[in-house]
Amino acid sequence: MDGDPELISVARDLLADAERIVVLTGAGVSAESGVPTFRGHGGLWKEHRPEELATPEAFRRDPRLVWEWYAWRRGLLADCEPNPAHRALARLALALPGRTTPVTQNVDGLPHRAAWEVAGARDPAPALPLEVHGALHRDRCSGCGSIAERPDPVDATSAAALPKCRSCGALMRPDVVWFGEALDPEVIGAAFDAAAVADVCLVVGTSALVHPAASIPSATLAGGGALVEVNVEPTVLTPAARVSVLGPAAALLPSLLDQVAEP
Ligand code: BJW
Ligand code: ZN
């Protein structure tokens, strides 16, 4: 499915006329890079639901199991590359600096890699999204909160082998936001501020079921702006969208955005 050309044209016009755009991406934008989504077809891992694994309670109960899951996902990501959807979004943000705010729920770091790739000699900053759910490649201390980059794979074969904090000795954990945990108020606040003044919120590849991130498009609607949705299937946001284009993000976003991003 490659999207209805008429709907793509309406979406393109809305984006071209917008002074300010906020882009909210979810797992679907990375699906064509080979990163599994959470819900629906081919969603994540074994018999566990993310809601049952991605919680502080699960980590307290069985940190080895949780680390095994995240180590497996880090391993998967090592073979994944940004796809044409990530690059199209990076081109848009670089073409409209200060007018586009990219926000992602994804922890895979692929938008950052696309931003650096597309920016070349330019500053990638306008295309680096607000990562409202953190980043998978970083560790954070479950005791003192200190952050560490981890270039090597985590050994999750035994509880004793799990990584410990160099400062306080507590267990390290992935630097991501689990269910029941607060999002960084500065990061999620900046996303809501941008959404509230955006003329268009472009929502790509999210089921929009996980709050507060799923409420970001509502802030644009409340401010009088419009939603443009790109997804392979309808979502809870579809009835509120001015235009909803059905199809895979990597196939649709380059043709949808590249004319908007032209100088
Ligand atoms: C494609 C495609 C292609 C596929 N092209 N599209 C209000 C109402 C109800 C509940 C709550 C509420 N407010 C808070 C809650 C509770 C909870 C919550 O939302 N629960 C609901 C599930 C019911 N929220 C929280 O707990 C949050 N914290 C919080 O609220 O704290 C309050 C607090 C304040 C003060 C002190 C203490 C606490 C935290 C939420 C954290 C979510 N974390 C995760 C895991 C991150 C780490 C990790 O990756 O392991 O984030 S869960 C998981 O879901 C991940 C994602 O970012 C997030 C969203 O998923 P996403 O991206 O939408 O993926 P999918 O799989 O759901 O959808 C993929 C979509 O792509 C589908 O639509 C496909 O069709 C589409 N698609 N291929 C285009 N090629
Ligand atoms: Zn520590």
Image: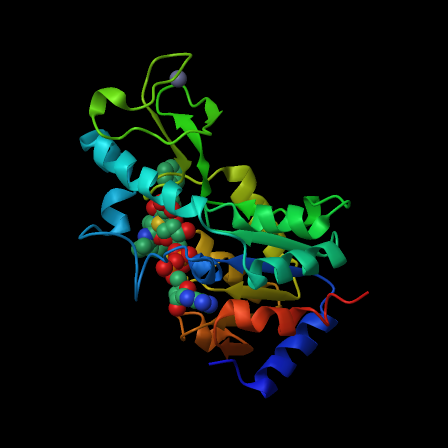
Note whether residue 45 is visible: yes
Note whether residue 207 is visible: no
Count the marks: 0
Q: Position of residue 107 (x, y in %)?
A: 45, 45
Up-down relation of residue 161 to residue 251 (above or below): above
For the residue pair 117 and 249, the one nearer the viewer reads as 117
Q: Position of residue 24 (x, y in %)?
A: 53, 58
State the residue at coordinates (63%, 62%): 88
State the residue at coordinates (62%, 58%): 87
Looking at the image, residue 86 sits to the left or right of residue 106; the answer is right
State the residue at coordinates (33%, 22%): 163
User: Quick one: quadrant of the C terminus?
Assistant: bottom right
Q: How was this image coloured?
A: rainbow
Q: Position of residue 140 (x, y in %)?
A: 42, 27
For the residue pair 262 and 101, the one nearer the viewer reads as 262
Up-down relation of residue 173 to residue 103 (above or below): above
Quadrant for residue 167, please give it: top left
Q: Residue furthest right?
A: 263
